[in-house]
Amino acid sequence: MSFAGKTAVITGSNSGIGLGIAREMAKAGVNVVLNSFSDSADDHALASGIVAEFGVEAKYIAADMSKSDDCRRLIVEAGRCDILVNNVGIQHVAPIEDFPAGKWDAIIAINLSSAFHTTAAALPGMRINGWGRIVNIASAHGLTASPYKSAYVAAKHGIVGMTKVVALETAQDPITANAICPGYVLTPLVEAQIPETMKEYGMDRETVIKDVMLARQPSKEFATVEQLGGTVNFLCSDAAAQITGTTISVDGGWTAL
């Protein structure tokens, strides 16, 4: 299908997975709205760069996705939202008895509640326009669990469940809702953790990647942001019009174990 005239709002998209998805969508001809909370000159430059490189419309809108009003304002200010990619997320690792209450609240707000608010704001326009795609970036942790990640795992399981509800509520509309569950992706944030992990375990880079970071990923390879963007594009295509309410794992076999 042609994506000409379609606009995608991608939350948390000034770096990493979100930016990779935005670039792949722009490459396919989708107009994109980038988002983060920082509102820097570099953020706006990313949008300008996408316009120059791919010839689509692109803009940056700052919004704090921990705040319900900001989440809904993002959709309003976008002007049009044919495709909503709920990607924004944060992480904190600690045992449950030591997990700071504030960190729990922040992770649930950003990783789960933001998707509720953006979806609620975007659906009326999708119904009016007679077409829509909602893609929620969950995680392998939306299908399984790891110790010390209680808030993240709870939020990602919640995203998977909410995706199913949205799919059922829009089943007779030309709107679909699906979740992508990535395993480890080599984003700048993950890349930055490698030197510290090498020092902690006394291992070289290759061993840290395969035996520590990718210990649960049978392929022993990172998924890429381009692969995730391609999966999003597929879910937005006509070929995926009857795919709704499900999860697609991009995890090198992690959740097959």
Image (cartoon, rainbow, N blue to C red):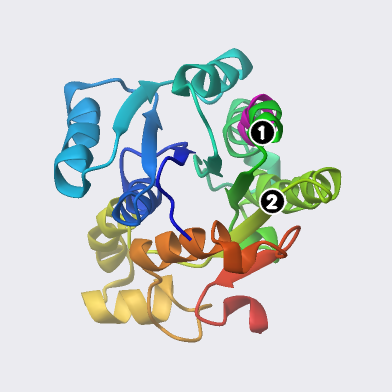
Q: Nearer the viewer, residue 159 or 54?
A: 54
Q: Residues within 10 Å of mark 1 (few under 14, many from 20)?
A: many
> Residue at position x 16%, y 47% from top?
53
Please tell me in which quadrant of the rendered image residue 249 appears: bottom right
Q: Is residue 146 visible?
A: no
CA–CA distance in space, label 1 to label 2: 10 Å
State the extent of the magenta-drawn residues as a range.
Answer: 114-122
Counting residues from the N terminus, which is met first, the one under dot 1 or under dot 2?
1
Predominant secondary structure in magenta? helix
84 with respect to 46 (left or right) = right
Q: Quadrant of residue 103?
A: top right
- Seen in the picture, residue 57 relative to 234 is either above or below; the reply is above
Which quarter of the image is occupied by the C terminus?
bottom right
Instruction: Return the residue at label 1.
Output: 119
Q: Is residue 120 magenta?
A: yes
Instruction: Report x, y in % for residue 114.
Output: 61, 30
- Residue beneath the point at 32% across and 49% down: 26
Residue type, mark 1 in image: Thr
Residue 107 in sight here: yes
At 63% from the left and 30% from the top, the residue drawn is 122
Q: Which residue is mark 2?
A: 177
Does the magenta-highlighted stretch encompass residue 21? no
Relative to 104, say whether 17 is above or below: below
Residue 50, given in percent of the width and then of the height, sits at 22, 42
Q: Amino acid at mark 2?
A: Ala
Horizontal relation, residue 162 to residue 128: left or right: right
Q: Are marks 1 and 2 in contact (CB under 8 Å)?
A: yes
